[in-house]
Amino acid sequence: DAGITQSPRHKVTETGTPVTLRCHQTENHRYMYWYRQDPGHGLRLIHYSYGVKDTDKGEVSDGYSVSRSKTEDFLLTLESATSSQTSVYFCAIAAGISGNTIYFGEGSWLTVV
Amino acid sequence: AQKVTQAQTEISVVEKEDVTLDCVYETRDTTYYLFWYKQPPSGELVFLIRRNSFDEQNEISGRYSWNFQKSTSSFNFTITASQVVDSAVYFCALTNDYKLSFGAGTTVTVRA
């Protein structure tokens, strides 16, 4: 158990509405990540954070923003949800002895209708 | 750029057969880490192993074993005497600079 909690776990929303997913960790890890998983694409990095207020884009960042105002929380916002953002979203943290092992949360299933 | 290729999309075996999952990677970095994750039907991603680029020693953990060969840029995973509970999607991944790049995954189905 890497101490990662994602919320909500399941959400259905309408096209054009904003959506925020929350990732909470309990162990003060510096690095946090948001990935999305889609059939045929595997897992792709959306955004990541390397400290409070320090974030950077991944390979599929368009349409997403993130914020990290506290070490323990990393928020992913879909500014105006589209059907192409229907996906499973995973939060992750880098932990382990040298901080190079990445552990994942349980996932958040998002459906945009 | 980094790339991970899992050429096998699906593998189906009968219980107790051995299964080998192939993973080939590309990177220009000399220091990197390789991973395997398991995603059972319940959907969570379970960390199985991490190997750094300087450690080519093979590893065995119960029925699982991993063969890292830097010369061929491969990090293959074998499940010995497979069980129904091994049915899952298995992902190989590569990281340097704290960002993971995943392969597309191999779906393993173990039939009783």
Image: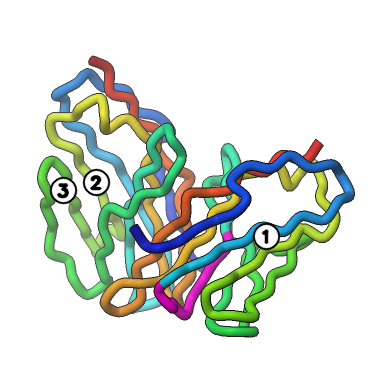
Q: Is residue A104 left or right of residue A85?
A: left
- The chain letter under disc 2 is B
Q: What span is in magenta?
A: A27-34
Q: Is residue B96 magenta?
A: no
Identify which amino acid the numbered label 3 is placed on: Ser
**Where B4 sits versus B98, above or below?**
above
Q: Which residue is mark 2?
A: B77
The residue that appears at 68% across and 74% down in the rendered structure is A67
Mark 3 or mark 2: which comes first in sequence?
Answer: 3
Q: Relative to A63, does residue A95 appear above or below in the rendering? A: below
Can residue B7 be seen by looking at this rendering? Answer: no
Element carrying mark 3: strand
Q: Which disc number belongs to residue A60?
A: 1
Q: Residue at x 28, y 23 (%)?
A: B110
**How far across and how far down the image is residue A101, in percent?**
34, 68
- Quarter of the figure with the N terminus of chain A: bottom left
Do we see residue A20 in this rendering? Answer: yes
- Answer whether labels 3 and 2 touch (C-beta < 8 Å): yes
Distance CA(mark 1)–CA(mark 3): 33 Å
Number of numbered labels in the structure image = 3
Estimate how packed mark 2 is, as few (under 14), some (14 to 19) or many (20 or more) residues with alpha carbons within 10 Å.
Answer: many
**Which residue corresponds to the image point at 43% horizontal and 77% vertical from the top-left?**
A29
Disc 3 designates what residue? B65
Q: In the displayed structure, does residue A78 sit left or right of residue A37? A: right
**Secondary element at image label 1:** loop
Residue B82 vs A30, above or below: the answer is above
Hey, what amino acid is under mark 1?
Val
